[in-house]
Image: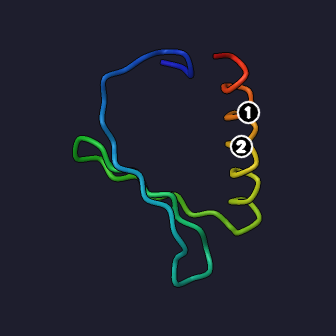
Amino acid sequence: MGINSEVDVEANLQIGPTDHGMVRIYIESQGVEIPMDFTPEEAEEIAEEIRAAAGTARNIK
């Protein structure tokens, strides 16, 4: 499976700060829970990548 592979899976996504000063991206799907903690700087880099991908996707359609 890759970026361009379609799948019929639902997942819940939560993003927020932790009480330890980290940013947590939390994904839950089909009984699997994946908490991922990032420093604020890492989270900003991820946000920039998401914005860039959104801009590219917007230009495709």
Q: Which residue is mark 2?
A: 51
Going by the image, does 22 lie left or right of 27?
A: right
Q: The C terminus lies in which quarter of the figure?
A: top right
Of all residues, the one furthest to the left in this rendering is 31
Closest to the observer, 60 or 11: 60
| Rendered location of residue 56, percent (x, y) | 74, 26
Q: Quadrant of residue 44?
A: bottom right
Q: Is residue 56 above or below residue 60?
A: below
In the rendered structure, find residue 55 and report the number of the disc placed on it.
Answer: 1
Position of residue 11 relative to residue 20, above or below, is above
Residue 33 placement (x, y as % from top left): 33, 53
Q: Position of residue 57 (x, y in %)?
A: 66, 25
Q: Amino acid at mark 1?
A: Gly
Q: Is residue 54 left or right of residue 48?
A: left
Please state the horizontal and vertical placement of residue 40, each as a whole percent of the image.
71, 69
- The amino acid on which the numbered mark 2 sits, given as a three-letter code, is Arg
Identify which residue, 2 or 12, lies in the foreground.
Answer: 12
Marks 2 & 1, CB-CB < 8 Å contact: yes
